[in-house]
Amino acid sequence: MEGVQVSARLRFIAPAIVALATACGGEGGALEGSVTPLLDLKYQRADAQLAEGTLAVSFINVQGTGQNVVLKVSARVTDMLPDAEYTGSLDIDLAQALEDGSQRGSVDRSVLDEPVRPFPLLQRGNLFVKSLPKTTGDRVSGEFNVTFVNGTDVYSGRTIFGRFEATAP
């Protein structure tokens, strides 16, 4: 656009405003950690769902008429809820061993044209949500971090973490 003059001040402020608006938008982002050189962990939206005693936060990219689940962090929480109507916060130890010997939490990924590769067990991990999703459209904010156990798997000993603002589908 010829003839449009932009002040020097605006040239320096505009990128900061755009970055701030993007960071506060709540939609999209990227997860971090030592797994990122191996996997693209950018996502367009986050969904949070509580169903059949399992809380799941999914980081999703839309692809055509379908979707890729870039990462899903799940936790069995039935025994942590005081009652069926509870909507408060939860601080979940994802690596906790349950009575049946399995871990409370798990990490999964389902992306088109990518081989399914299970993640290792968790050495440690935490999922914190400020509230639980009960109805469609509920907003859920929180954060998670996981460290996988050491071993021979490509993800062994690596980490993933992030903060999120999710919506109940």
Image: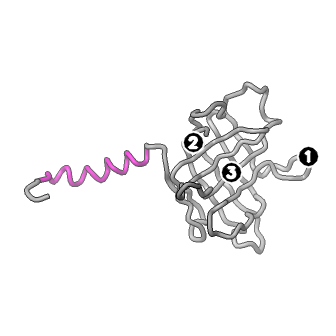
What is the CA distance from the residue labelled 1 to the residue labelled 2?
Answer: 30 Å
Q: Which residues are magenta?
A: 5-24
Vertical placement of 82 versus 13: above or below? above
Q: Residue furthest right?
A: 100
Which label number is shown at residue 73?
3
- In the drawing, does residue 114 fall left or right of residue 98? left
53 or 64: nearer the eye?
A: 64
Question: Which dot, 1 or 2, sits closer to the camera?
Answer: 2
Which label number is shown at residue 166?
2
- Kind of residue at badge 1: Glu
Question: Which dot, 1 or 3, sits closer to the camera?
Answer: 3
Q: Number of labelled discs? A: 3
Residue 41 falls in image quadrant: bottom right
Vertical placement of 111 versus 8: above or below? below
The residue singled out by tag 1 in the image is: 99
Q: Mark 3 near mark 2, Cβ–Cβ under 8 Å?
A: no
What is the CA distance from the residue labelled 1 to the residue labelled 3?
Answer: 20 Å
What is the CA distance from the residue labelled 3 to the residue labelled 2?
Answer: 12 Å
Residue 82 position within the rendered picture, expressed as x and y whole percent measured from the top left:
79, 27
- Disc 2 crowd rating (10 Å Cα; few below 14, some 14-19, many 20+) is many
- Kind of residue at badge 3: Val
Tell me the SS state at disc 1: loop
Q: Earlier in the sequence, mark 1 or mark 2?
A: 1
Q: Quadrant of the C terminus?
A: top right
136 or 81: nearer the eye?
A: 136
- Disc 1 crowd rating (10 Å Cα; few below 14, some 14-19, many 20+) is few
Q: Is residue 154 magenta?
A: no
Q: Mark 1 near mark 2, Cβ–Cβ under 8 Å?
A: no
Q: Earlier in the sequence, mark 3 or mark 2?
A: 3
Tell me the SS state at disc 2: strand
